Amino acid sequence: MTDLTLGAAHRTLRDEVTKELRRRILSGELAQGERLVEDRLAALLGVSRNPVRESIRVLATEGFVEVVPRLGATVARLSAAEGEELFDVRMAVEGLAARLAARKRTPESAERLRRVLEQAKEAVENGRLEEVADLNTAFHLAVGEAAGNSYLSLMMKPMLLRAQWVFSQTAAARGPHSWSEHLSLCEAIAAGDEDEAQARAIAHVAAARRSFLTAIRTAVAATNPPND
């Protein structure tokens, strides 16, 4: 963000407001279950209510916001059940993406993956968790692009936005492990080993699943302590 409000920028306001609200949800600045008051958000971002209202509708279609008639909008809550569904889909889609990326590898695609990994390594080492989450998504998108399948690419971006929200819940614990798993996957893709690339992608998603479910159980236990 710059010192300029979004209302002062010469951009499509709905898209920019949507991007900013999504970022705040992903980072936790807008907490799960928090009410989204249009007037307050408009004042905060320096825009009118209209782009905020439109953005809330977009984010509702993406699953980041829940809108209840006459009660208004709130940030959606991530549940263990939703996480399980997401990880099931990720295993299938990202396993296929890794296989195709290995099959269609080029020096350029391999170099792009390595560049993202180097940026991620630096962000992990310096504890820049929001950047770690962004680069985690960037890596998976790069694998999807390397797969060279337009139908797969259409599926991956909305799925990975949801996955980034899940990852942000465990970024502090998962960051170092995620980086090393990505490195291993990158090596298999660069080597053109389709079976190994697919296996490593699936193992990576399985590890992320375990981390997320552990975090959910810990949060539930903290809010519902056992009775003495």
Image (cartoon, rainbow, N blue to C red):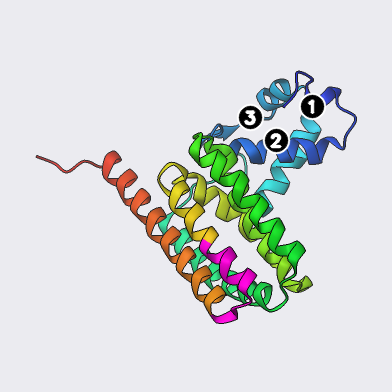
Q: What residue range appears in magenta?
A: 184-195
Residue 78 painted magenta: no
The disc placed on residue 37 is: 3
Image x and y of residue 50, in percent: 80, 33
Tell me the amino acid under the disc marked 3: Val
Q: Who comes first in sequence, dot 1 or dot 2?
A: 1
Quadrant (top left, top right, bottom left, bottom right) of the C terminus: top left
Q: Is residue 144 above or below residue 178?
A: below
Residue tagged 2: 20
The answer to the question of whether label 3 and label 1 lie on touching residues, with beta carbons closer than 8 A, is no
The answer to the question of whether label 1 and label 2 lie on touching residues, with beta carbons closer than 8 A, is yes
At numbered mark 1, what does the secondary structure look like: helix, strand or loop?
A: helix
Out of 179 and 5, give the one closest to the viewer. 179
The disc placed on residue 6 is: 1
Q: Who comes first in sequence, dot 3 or dot 2?
A: 2
Snapshot quadrant of residue 155: bottom right
Q: How crowded is mark 2: few (under 14 residues within 10 Å), some or many (20 or more)?
A: some
Tally the numbered discs. 3
Q: Distance between the residues labelled 1 and 2?
A: 9 Å
At numbered mark 2, what does the secondary structure look like: helix, strand or loop?
A: helix
Residue at the far top: name it.
3
